[in-house]
């Protein structure tokens, strides 16, 4: 399994960079602007993603890692990120979600499929993830749990990332199979995630009202036909402006999109 570590690490970094390059994304950093973020930009996020390559490779190579071992590697990854960004939290959520999927994919061998990666994640670390989700009340997830009764990304992980495996990845692949370009397919998948996930980043910034606004605007986009609408980019840009005005940023959905792109890559190009 460890011989696949460089491939998996490269796929993880590439997924983060692919998400970064997309535009228009409501409130998120892109090559065009910094969205709702005053402390980061496109160049900083690229630097952060590249700084995580070694940590993703370490996660993939740690064949017999316990959940506690993964936590230690993840904390080191956060330190690499903070050194690279001068203390700005650019990818903490992605380290958690994408890091878990890198570790699970490494343990499935070169013939993995999405369902096998999900099964491996739950069988090896599901119990610990459930405990972690309930215990982490000091995080944005804890804040969201108190407000909504759900626990954000950590609860998603404890359930085996249903938003990725049951919604985002099937939609993304269906769009690609229909001949929709990669960029458009990825953006519609982002809106799908925004419409269905309690995004801890959005709720931390905008409270329950912000979370409801974000979900409703994403659902409006999808109801209008998503990227099949002839003027979908105009609508997406309008929603982007509305998010910036409200200082909202669906960073959780962006992390889940990057994880979706990673899974598509590693289960399509077997190495």
Image (cartoon, rainbow, N blue to C red):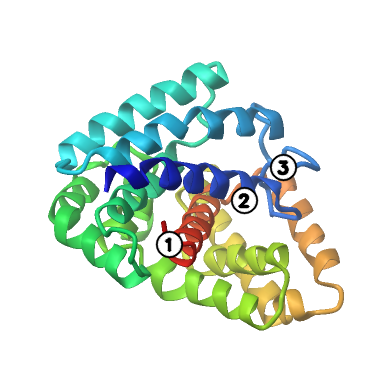
| Residue 219 position in % (x across, y down) | 62, 74
- The residue labelled by disc 1 is 270
Q: Which badge, 2 or 1, comes first in the chain's sequence?
A: 2
Which numbered disc flags the more N-terminal residue, 1 or 3? 3
Seen at 34% across and 39% down, the residue is 139
Residue bearing the label numbered 2: 19
Q: Which residue is mark 3?
A: 35
Q: Position of residue 143 (x, y in %)?
A: 36, 45
Nearer-N-terminus badge (3/2): 2
Q: Describe residue 271's horizontal placement relative to residue 115 as left or right.
A: right
Residue at 17% over, 41% down: 65
Comparing labels 3 and 2, the label whose residue is closer to the camera: 2
Q: CA distance from mark 1 to mark 3?
A: 35 Å
Q: 181 or 270: nearer the eye?
A: 270
Q: Quadrant of the C terminus?
A: bottom left
Distance from the alpha carbon under mark 2 to that under mark 1: 21 Å
């Amino acid at each position: 399994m460890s011989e696949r570590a460089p491939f998996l690490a490269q796929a993880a970094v590439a997924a983060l960079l692919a998400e970064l390059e997309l535009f228009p994304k409501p409130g998120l950093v892109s090559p065009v602007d910094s969205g709702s973020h005053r402390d980061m930009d496109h160049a900083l996020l690229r630097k952060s993603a590249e700084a995580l390559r070694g940590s993703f490779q370490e996660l993939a190579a740690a064949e017999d890692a316990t959940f506690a071992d993964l936590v230690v590697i993840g904390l080191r990854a956060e330190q690499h990120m903070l050194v690279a960004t001068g203390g700005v939290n650019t990818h903490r959520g992605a380290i958690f979600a994408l890091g878990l999927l890198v570790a699970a994919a490494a343990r499935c061998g070169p013939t993995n499929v999405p369902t096998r990666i999900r099964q491996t994640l739950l069988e090896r670390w599901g119990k610990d993830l459930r405990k972690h989700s309930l215990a982490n009340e000091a995080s944005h997830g804890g804040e969201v749990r108190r407000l909504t009764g759900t626990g954000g990304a950590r609860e998603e992980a404890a359930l085996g990332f249903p938003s990725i495996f049951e919604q985002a990845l099937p939609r993304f692949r269906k769009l690609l199979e229909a001949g929709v370009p990669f960029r458009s397919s990825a953006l519609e998948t982002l809106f799908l995630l925004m419409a269905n996930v309690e995004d801890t980043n959005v709720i931390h910034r905008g409270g329950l009202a912000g979370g409801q606004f974000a979900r409703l605007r994403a659902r409006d986009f999808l109801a209008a036909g998503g990227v099949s609408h002839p003027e979908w980019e105009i609508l997406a840009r309008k929603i982007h402006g509305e998010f910036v005005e409200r200082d909202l940023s669906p960073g959780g959905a962006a992390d889940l999109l990057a994880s979706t792109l990673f899974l598509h890559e590693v289960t399509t190009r077997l190495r």
